Image: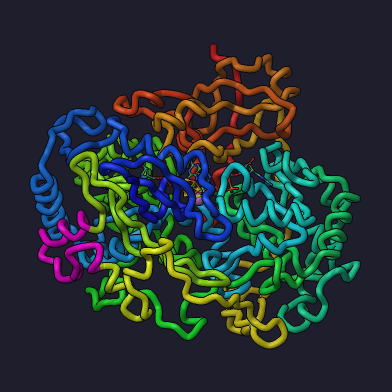
Amino acid sequence: MAQEVFSICFMCTIRCPIRVLVENDDVKWIEGNPHVPGIEGALCAKGSAGLALLHDHERPQHPMIRTGPRGAGEWQKATWNEALDYVGDRLKEIIKQHGGQSVVFGERTNLNTHISKTFVKAIGSPNHFTHDALCKGSVNTAFRSLTGFTDAQVGVDYANTRYIVMYGRNIFEALEIKPINNLLNAMEKGAKLIYIDPRVSITATKADRYLMIRPGADLALNYALIHTILKEKLYDAPYVRRWVKDLKELQAFVSPYTPEWAEAECGIPAHEIVTLAREAAAAKPAVVFHYGYRGAHHPNEIYFRRSLIILNALMGSIEAKGGIFFKKGPKAFGLGDIRKYTEQELPKVKAPRFDGSGHDKFPIADASHGNPQMLAHAILNEDPYPIKALFANRFEPLQSIPDAAATRKALDKLDLIVAIDVNFSEIAWYADVILPESMYLERADSLQLVTGLKPQIYMRRQAVSPRYDTRPAWLILKQIAQRLDLGKYFPYETIEDIWNFQLQDLGVTIEDFAAKGFVALTDQTLLWDREKGIKFKTPSGKFELVSALMESAGFPSFPPYTPTPKSDNGAFKLMVGRGAAHTHMSTQNNLYLNELAPENFLWINTGAANHLGIKDGEVVEVVSPIATARIKAKVTDFIHPEAVFMLHGFGKTVPAQTRCYLKGASDALLQENISDRVGGSPCLDATMVRVRRPK
Ligand SMILES: Nc1nc2c(c(=O)[nH]1)N[C@H]1C(S)=C(S)[C@@H](COP(=O)(O)OP(=O)(O)OC[C@H]3O[C@@H](n4cnc5c(=O)[nH]c(N)nc54)[C@H](O)[C@@H]3O)O[C@H]1N2
Ligand SMILES: Nc1nc2c(c(=O)[nH]1)N[C@H]1C(S)=C(S)[C@@H](COP(=O)(O)OP(=O)(O)OC[C@H]3O[C@@H](n4cnc5c(=O)[nH]c(N)nc54)[C@H](O)[C@@H]3O)O[C@H]1N2
Ligand code: SF4
Ligand SMILES: [Mo]
């Protein structure tokens, strides 16, 4: 008889709840947790391919210590004691000679991040960073500048929306199951989806209206929308009067930005812009101008994200049913909070961060996440001090940070690189030590608090025993800390110890998760009172158009619009993104997913391709200011003539990953490392490239 285990998927960081059927310590079936509304059994292709990762012999099977030059693939198989001693000994030496700040620890935010942060503080380093700035740093700063909340504290009420506008938020490919199901239900009930992208993505094909925009010109469109909304008084007047500060300044600022002006800049006809403003206003406040994640990463990104959030405020949709809302945690319902190990008394760290986050280089970026795009600069220039060791835990600096060649060069300067990974990623292959983590079906992790209109807690339970000699990261970090005599900061032996600690203030027990895999902390939905109760966390307590946060750092809230330069003959904006079959750069070697999408292609407009003599399917060279790559062309009418597009995550160089080895091209190699210094994100869609037939 198969046994049912409720857990949490980790084929990507959306972390959908799953139900796993296990027989004889092997996984027979994975599906979405049927008890969770919005999930109800659904799983994406990547989630199903968790089975292939479990059984993959092309992943690290035991700890490994490098014996040859970095990246040469010469390894010595090690026991856990040998590998952990190796890391412990080197770390002790480095900290003694160069101080704790010389150690940088990067990870994709995960359920055990409170343990990683404890580890970094315990060794005396300020240098924990997450992927966040690379993903949505400027969204985060934009929200803080206007509302005082981070983007992570904001959600979209897809289920009840009546009108949703997405700018490169390619939700049906760069997917999240629950939001998609809720959105599809809303669309069945009549909600309208408007999609704006220089490329006809799958989401464009499902939209009620698709608008092809010039790459990088979304801000012009939004200023014209705001212009129209203010001029025609289409906004939610009582809401705006009550909550929105500095409307007059906004009005004066947008007055020159007419729909006709925007048409010339962004290519969307003026009458379409006016229609969009009027249609959205007719559905208010159940309207969403989606603030997005990744589409449209350009140097003006902070102002683009701000303009999107401002459109929501004008529609009165912030804290409205069918709009966007501030997520509520257990405290909002008068309950205790989930505990974290970072709450304990930890050594005080005086050194500034290595990346200038929240400091000189990115004064208003969120320093609790950092700015990983500064990694190569900090190492190569010893700015602000020498960096000697890097931990990459569930993070891939060689593919997730622009200008991979610079990153690789910087890594050569380090004394120690430790990779904690489930794959032979580029960084694992370049590391000194690989500490293989058990994959998610083989391990349990810290609990997940999902805040929202109804907060819930989810549990990742171990479904089967590890196939190979691997361990969970929460144990690996404790065992390294013990070798540095810092074990006292990790007061647990088992996952149950961690769970009991996390739950102690909540009146919930481990047993409560048995029936459905999660615990709902309330059955109430909480939206704040739109007349009296919205608790903006800005100095004024209002939605601040002129932002105290930005102005205090010397950044204007409304600088004049800078036009996007016209691409000349043969130069294109390189846009990147995700497809439904892969997670970033983690899954290209997965047996099932590799079959679905074995390589990436360069989308190029038919007219532009004809002009350059490029044929569909032919291998072309993409030349950026810093690198050249070869990739097959996909010649299509479905992309703007000023842009080319490729999927992120290909062009891998690790021979141990035989299925994806040298397939397609790596975007990180081609992208220049330019940042939006106000918002904090690198501009991943802003590199200009030329395309040519190979000589
Ligand atoms: N299958 C899958 N799903 C995922 C993930 C995954 O790895 N795989 N990752 C998750 C994560 S971490 C994230 S951040 C989200 C990302 O979710 P999205 O941000 O929706 O995803 P991207 O694939 O980056 O989509 C970028 C889109 O922006 C468009 N774009 C580029 N430049 C411009 C521009 O100037 N203007 C406009 N309007 N559009 C532009 C591109 O053509 C592309 O279609 O997806 C999440 N879901
Ligand atoms: N050039 C370029 N850079 C980008 C992007 C882009 O489109 N182009 N997108 C940006 C975005 S939106 C994001 S969110 C980030 C994502 O950046 P990353 O977080 O670096 O990417 P992921 O693919 O999510 O996974 C990183 C690593 O985690 C490993 N991994 C997977 N599962 C586990 C596990 O259970 N345990 C451990 N220890 N390791 C595991 C994978 O093998 C991989 O090496 O990249 C950003 N950077
Ligand atoms: S979106 Fe797919 S891969 Fe990501 S957590 Fe959900 S089921 Fe897993
Ligand atoms: Mo992301």
Spot occupied by residue 596 in the image (x, y as percentages of width and height) = 51, 28
Query: Residue 476 sits in which quadrant?
Result: bottom left
Q: Is residue 226 left or right of residue 98?
A: right
Spot occupied by residue 423 in the image (x, y as percentages of width and height) = 32, 38
Name the outermost residue toward the front. Answer: 1
Is residue 486 covered in magenta?
yes
Q: Which residues are magenta?
A: 475-497
In this view, the residue in front, 421 or 87, is: 421
Instruction: Say if 461 sits above or below 578 in the image.
Output: below
Give the residue drawn at x 61%, y 59%: 302
Q: Quadrant of the N terminus?
A: top left
Instruction: Specify whether residue 640 is in view.
Output: yes
Name the outermost residue toward the top. Answer: 695
Q: Is residue 346 left or right of residue 506?
A: left
- Quick check: which quadrant has ligand 2? top left
Spot occupied by residue 34 in the image (x, y as percentages of width and height) = 50, 55
Instruction: Specify whether residue 550 is in view.
Output: no
Assign the magenta stretch its main secondary structure.
helix
In this view, the residue in front, 73 or 436, is: 436
Q: Quadrant of the C terminus?
A: top right
Give the residue drawn at x 52%, y 65%: 152
Is residue 154 covered in magenta?
no
Spot occupied by residue 205 in the image (x, y as percentages of width and height) = 73, 39
